[in-house]
Image: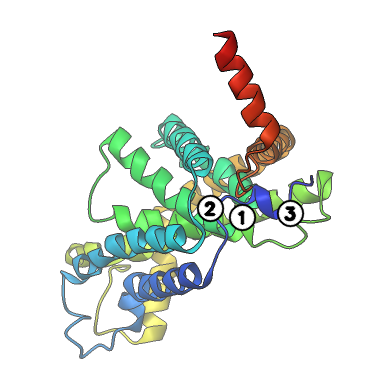
Amino acid sequence: MSGTDPLTRPVRLGPRSVAAIGLVTAVGVVAFGWPLLAESDSGLAHSGDAPWLFALLMPLLLGVVMATVSDTGLGAKAVAMLGVLAAAGAALRPLGAGTAGLEPMFFLMVLSGRVLGPGFGFALGGLSMFASALLTGGVGPWLPFQMLTMGWVSMGAGLLPGPHRLRGRAELAMLAGYGAVAAVLYGVVMNLYGWPFITGMATGISYSAEDPLEAKLAKFVAYVLATSMGWDLSRALLTVVLVLVLGGAVLRALRRATRRAAFGAPVAFTSASFAGDEGGNADR
């Protein structure tokens, strides 16, 4: 059985799942992009509470999970693997958090999404961030944004081309490149969440609702370069190194585990199994 057999995908995207992920993605784009999208004369642009309004992302993320379960069913084996990988991701994050932006959990999210598919990847990214927040005390209004963004990172890995044919060094090179880009974009997107909060600092890179779009974009680029680009590049570099060094072994382990789990395989009882069970009971 190949690593891309349908039975190795514990969460397959059905119509409800696709619709729910599309909805939460659309809301997420607005939630992150409102500083750039809002008109200067709108109430939203001048509201310091705007990020709080998008706390509805949390129930939408939960809705994605519920839609996935109702679409395909999330069996005990899939739940177990989701829990193990989410716990591993949550444990990896504190190892580098706060140290030059080094976050080793990214490589695991990319590899898991690649093997287990976009549906599982989206659920894994969000759950891993939630678990790591509980572990490190990082629960706050930013958490739904982190969950959504990490869900996008892991889901994107599951959507990469060539799952049936691409293996070996070519696959690792593709995953390393994707991981680097995703690690940088994660930081850039999360900066959109935090940028409006520095309005009161009155610096040259502060968000101002009165600025035209071109000025906002210029300030935001300057804000990213001044505050986080060094961290983002460090995160990207670490992701590339871990994928290239450990990626082959992790991919083989994940594919072996998913083949043995045979997600979605129907349970069938044969007469032989009943006969064997009766014989065992008789012996006892």
Report the Cα–Cα distance between label 2 and label 1. Answer: 6 Å
Identify the image's colour scheme: rainbow, by chain, secondary structure or one colour.
Answer: rainbow
Answer with the quarter of the image where residue 211 lies. Answer: bottom left
Nearest the viewer among 261 and 206 is 261
Q: Position of residue 15 (x, y in %)?
A: 51, 73
Question: Of circles 2 and 3, which is in front?
Answer: 2
Residue in front for this viewpoint, 277 or 80: 277
Dot placed on the residue nearer the N-terminal end, 1 or 3? 1
Tag 2: Cα neighbours inside 10 Å, few (<14), some, or many (≥20)? Answer: many
Label 2 vs 3, first from the N-terminus? 2
Q: Is residue 208 left or right of residue 82?
A: left
Report how far apart the C-alphas of labels 2 and 3 lie in the structure: 20 Å
Quarter of the image with the N terminus in it: top right
Which residue is drawn at the image coordinates 47% and 56% (left, top)?
151
Label 3 is placed on what type of residue? Answer: Met
Image quarter where the C terminus lies is: top right
Residue 174 is marked as 3
Q: For the residue carrying disc 3, how many other residues have a C-alpha within 10 Å: few (<14), some (14-19), or many (20+)?
A: some
SS class of the residue under badge 3? helix
Q: What's the residue type where badge 1 is placed?
A: Gly
- Relative placement, left or right, of 108 versus 146 is right
For residue 211, say whether it is visible.
Answer: yes
Q: Residue at x 27, y 42 (%)?
A: 138
Say above or below: 105 vs 178: above
According to the image, label 1 marks what residue? 117
Q: Callout 1: 10 Å neighbours few (<14), some, many (20+)? A: many
Residue that label 2 marks = 120
Q: CA distance from mark 1 to mark 3?
A: 16 Å
Number of marks in picture: 3
